[in-house]
Amino acid sequence: MKNIVSLCKRRGFIYPGSEIYGGFANTYSYGPYGVELKKNIKDLWWQIFVREKENIVGIDGPILLHPKTWEASGHVKCFTDALIDCKKCKNRFRADQLIEKILNIKSESLNLKSISSIIKENKIKCPNCNASDFTEARHFNLMFQIEMSKTDNQNEIAYLRPETAQAIFLEYKNILDSMRIKIPFGIAQIGKAFRNEITPGNFIFRTIEFEQMEIEYFIKEKEWKKTFEYWLEEMLNWCKEIGLNSNKIETHEHKKEELSHYSKKTVDIIFDFPFGKSELYGLAYRTDFDLKQHAQYSKSKQEYIDQETKEKFIPHVIEPTFGLDRTILAILSNSFEEETLENGEKRTILHLSPKIAPVKAAVFPLMKKQELISKSLKIYENIKKRWNTEYDENGAIGKRYRRQDEIGTPFCITIDYETLENDTVTIRERDTMKQKRVKIDYIKNNLENFLKIF
Ligand code: GAP
C-alpha cells in the first residue's frame, strides 16, 4: 500500500487533500493521470450499463435534495455509527470496528449498552494512547448537515447526499412520464456522495467525499430473485472487464443483522486489497421500501400502471452499487508490480487494462535530433486526436519507457533513422516489452486492435 500511495503522489494520480494546510483527513485530489483513469472508468461503466442496455437510462441529480428525502429514506434515523471517545487523548473511534479488530467478534447486532460493556469488560485499549478509558458508545449520524439561510431567520437543515440512490428515486416518476419506458427498467447515475466517516481510511478506500456509480432497477416483485442473480453476474463481469484478478474477488451475503434498514438481501463483492479483504461493491434488494416511503412522505403517487394488464403497483428495486474510488484502489493494487529485470534493473509497472489506462500511447524520437523530432511530432499530433497520447524527447530511451510503464501506458512508439528511410516505427508493448516494426499508416489500426476501447 505504501508503494501505491507513493506512486500515486509522485506520478500525479492522487494527492492528499489540502496538503499545504497540513492536510484534511480522508480527502484526496485526483491529479492529471488520476482524473484520466477515473474518467475512463466512468465512461466504460456508462457505455456498458447505460448505452449498451436497452432498458437503462441515466440521470444527473442534485447533491442537495429536499431534507424530507432523508427522513423518508430512513437515513435521518438509521444511518448511524456507534462511536466512542478516548477520555485521555480525545480521539474518536468506531466502536464496532474496535471490537471487531481487537476481539475478532462481529458486532452489527449489538446495541449501544452491550457495545459499551464489551469495551469495558475486555479493557480495550485506545489505539492512539493505550489508555482504557472510553466514553459510553453513542450513535452519530453519518450525514453531513448544512444550514440553508432563510428569510424568516429560521434556518433550514439540509444534508449532503450520503448515497446517489435517493436522487434516482425522486426522479422515478418523471422518468416514467417523460421516457417511454416499461418495467423492468433501470435508472443509472454517477455522482458524489458524502459521509462523515470517523475512522481513518486506508488511502481512498474510505473517504468523506467519494463517487458512486449506481443503478436502481425497477421490477415486479415476483422477479426479484432472478433479477438479483442477473445483476450479481453483471457485476462480476464488470470486475473482469476492468482487469481485476478473479482470485482476488469473492462474494459475501449479509446476515440478517448486517443488512441495511432498506434491504431484504445484500451480497457484497469483496476484493483482496493490500490491507485485507473488504467490500468493493454491493448488490441489494431494496424491495419497494424507498418508493413507498417517498409516496407516504411526499403524498405523491409512485405507482406503476401496466398498460396491458392495467395492474397498478409500486415496483420493487434491485440496486447494484459501485464505489468509484474503491474501483480505482482495487485497479491500482491489482495492477501494481515491481519487477527486477535480467540486468538487475528495477521496473515499476501498472498493468492497467488498455481500455482504462490514462495514457494510451507515448511517442518518442530515439534521439534529440531535429529530423527525428519533426517526424515524431507529426505522428504525435495525429494520434492524440484519437487517444490520450504523450510526447517525450528527454533522457535515455530506457528511462522514457520506464516512466510510461509506471503510469500504465500500454504502447510506446519510437521514431528512429529507419523511420526516415521507410516510414516504419517500432511499437513497444508495456507488459512483454516486445517491439515490432509497423508502417506509420498502420499505427492507428494497430492501436485500434490492441486498445479495443469499445
Ligand atoms: N446506495 C447504496 C449504498 O450507498 P453502500 O454499501 O453504503 O450502499 C455503496 O455504498 C458503495 O459505495 C460501497 O460498496 C463502496 O464501494 C462505496 N463507499 C461507501 N462508503 C464509502 C466511503 N466512505 N468511501 C469510499 N467509498 C465508499
Image: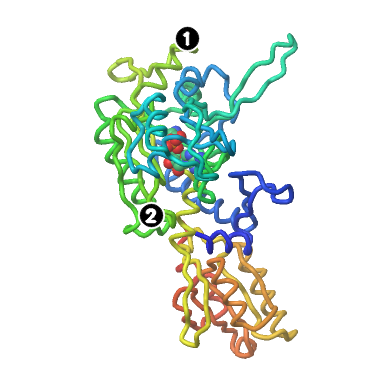
Q: Residues within 10 Å of mark 1 (few under 14, many from 20)?
A: few
Q: How crowded is mark 2: few (under 14 residues within 10 Å), some or many (20 or more)?
A: some
Please determine whether, in this image, residue 299 is positioned above or below residue 188: above
Residue occupied by mark 1 = 299
Res 215 visible? no
Give the amino acid at mark 2.
Asp
Picture disc at residue 46: none
Describe residue 269's horizontal placement relative to residue 432 as left or right.
Answer: left
Q: Position of residue 395 (x, y in %)?
A: 68, 81
Secondary structure beneath dot 1 equals loop
Describe residue 241's horizontal placement relative to residue 223 as left or right.
Answer: right
Mark 2 residue CB less than 8 A from any atom of ligand 1 = no
**Pick the front one: 299 or 5:** 5
Give the amino acid at mark 1.
Lys
Q: Write the residue at 46% across / 41% down.
A: 125
Q: Where is residue 99 in the image (x, y as percent from the top left)?
A: 39, 38
Assess whether mark 2 and mark 1 are in contact (beta carbons under 8 angstroms): no
Res 328 visible? yes
Q: Write the residue at 55% across / 38% down.
A: 191
Q: Position of residue 224 (x, y in %)?
A: 27, 30
Q: Write the residue at 53% across / 64% down.
A: 3
Mark 1 vs mark 2: which is more N-terminal?
2
Residue occupied by mark 2 = 272
Q: Where is residue 309 in the image (x, y as percent from the top left)?
A: 27, 18
Q: Which of marks 1 and 2 is in front?
A: 2
Dividing the picture into quadrants, the one containing residue 255 is: top left
Please determine whether, in this image, residue 94 is positioned above or below residue 114: below
**Pick the front one: 47 or 197:** 197
Q: Write the residue at 52% across / 30% down.
A: 142
Gap in angstroms between the C-alphas marked 1 and 2 = 45 Å
